Each structure stands twice: as C-alpha cells, then as structure tokens.
Image (tube, grey):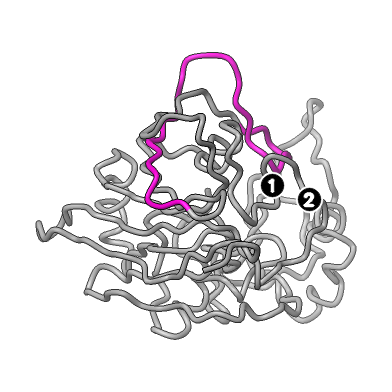
Amino acid sequence: MPPHPSPLPQRHGIDAAWVRTPGPGPDGAPPWSTMREFLLDRLPAGAEVERRLAAGEFVDQQGRPWTGDEEYRSHTFVWFHRPLAPETPVPFPLGILDRTDNLVVVDKPHFMATTPRGAHVRETALVKLRVALDLPELTPAHRLDRLTAGVLVFTTRRGCRGAYAGVFQSRRVAKTYEAVARFDATLSFPMRLVGRIEKRRGSLQASLVPGEPNAETLVEVVEVQEGYARYRLTPITGKTHQLRLQMADAGLPLVGDPLYPEVKEDAPDAYGDPLRLIARRLRFTDPLDGVERDYTSGRALTWPADVRR
C-alpha cells in the first residue's frame, strides 16, 4: 500500500490513483530507461500519458510533477487522477437513516455500488455521500453488493475507522435480510444452509465446493403468495454472494438475480425488476460510545409481476 496521505486531493469525492514501479530485473538492470517508458508500458493506451505528462498530471509522493524524462526509479509511487467516463444515473434516492460524529448510515437503493469499481464510480454510495456531506474521509464499514439494497454503514473519520471495522470483522453485528424466491412446499422451514464457498479471481460467480464449511445461513418463511415466498435470511457468516448462492443451490434462486444460478451475460440493469434482496435490519453495540445501534431499511421488496396482490 502507498504511504498516507496522498499528495493529490480528492476530485469529485474520488481518491487519486497510483502505480508503483517494480524493482530491477534478475540481472539487476532496470526494466525501463525512463519514467515515461514505464508509464507508457504500464498504463492503457487511452490513458493519454504524453499529454498528461506535459500537463503535469502525474506526481511523485511529494506532489512534484513527473516530466517523464527522469531516469527510471524502482519502488516509486506515481500518483494521478483517472479520467471519468459518463455514467447512467441510478434513478433511486440514497436515503440517510442516521448521522453522528462517527457514522453515516444509509438506506442504499438497488443498482448503486457501495464503492467505485469498474464502470461505476460517481454513481456510488461512497462518492455521492462524500460530495453531498463534505466528508472526504468517509469510508464504508462493510459492503453491500451493487444489486442488493438496504442498510449500509460508513465511518466519517480515519481515526474511528478501525474500531468499527473490528465490530464487523469479528461478527459482532446482527444482520437480517429479506428476499423473494419461489416457494417449495417439500422443504422444511426454518432451514439452515451450510457449505464451503470460494470465489476465484476473474469469476463473476462464487461456488460451493467440497471442504470444511465456512458459510451458514438461517432461512425462514415470512409469507407465501402464489408459488413465491418472502424469506427472512440471517447470515451467520459473511462470504461473497453467500445468500444468493446458497438459496440458488437449495433450488430457491432469488427473483431478479442475473448471476445465480446462471450468469445472464451483458444483462442491462432492469430498474423495474431488481434483485429481490434487501439488507433489512442491522444491529450492533457502538464500540466508541456503547450505544445500541439498530437500523431498519424502508426499501420495498416487491413480488414478481405474475403474482396478483
């Protein structure tokens, strides 16, 4: 990781990016002659390296612009801001449930990513809140998938980040989700789903594999409507895509899921048919003031279009 702080301020609520130069090759010779050669080789063609070098947009750890003519330097950070591509606005509001000196708690809508990644940068909960609330140190205490709605907690300051991260990492948080999936009368509820989940780099899906279990979810039926049910899901663990994968494996894939049980390639965001999964309730004891925090999402969990209400 790079040293803190960044020599470049945030831009539009987005942190500066960086690359670190590698060390010498096996023969002790530098892999490139100049810093320009390194940047041209390492950054994508669309990065406009020459133009941005001329404009002084690449800087070192002290904030001094690289000209590109410098001799190659091993183990050195180069900082810059990535160009921002146009994004389709997420057509749902990001509601604030609570704000304290240490926390911002929101009711995240479907289709909004928690943090910048890939094509989703400005239309993310983190960036929107940093800009709207003028909180440059805002950081998520945990994450929700882009397609999952519900309660999401952010810390406001670097100084309190570790305390809340410890709460979430040590599973001292009670989380309850709600989901809609088909109903199978042959299954017995409440039901516990237990297995081992692994996710390979580069794969969109996580997988259930043989081995010691590392994922457990309690599944309860709340109500049944015309072949579908609204379920209460209580994860005991927090593996990637745990609820979506385990429900699909049980023969109960969540309505509106483009990943499980099968990947729907290049499926556009269907704003009228979201993933029916909401982080409904989140409870924990505040590690800094001892207050019992209890938050509930007000997001609607809709039935499929073919269910008459």
Q: Are marks 1 and 2 in contact (CB under 8 Å)?
A: yes
Q: Is residue 265 magenta?
A: no
Secondary structure state at the residue bearing disc 1? loop
Q: Is residue 187 left or right of residue 106?
A: right
Name the residue: 34% across, 41% down: 169
Picture coordinates of residue 78 (x, y %)?
66, 60
Residue 264's disc is 2
Q: Is residue 4 left or right of residue 89?
A: left
Q: Quadrant of residue 208?
A: top right
Residue 224's disc is none
Q: Is residue 201 magenta?
A: yes
Magenta segment boundaries in residue numbering: 199-224
Q: Quadrant of residue 266?
A: bottom right
Above or below for 306 versus 96: above
Secondary structure state at the residue bearing disc 2? loop
Name the residue: 53% across, 43% down: 183
Q: Is residue 14 left or right of residue 215?
A: right
Which one is earlier in the sequence, the residue at label 1 or at label 2?
A: 1
Crowding at label 2, few (<14), some or many (≥20) Cα neighbours within 10 Å? few
Residue 259's disc is 1
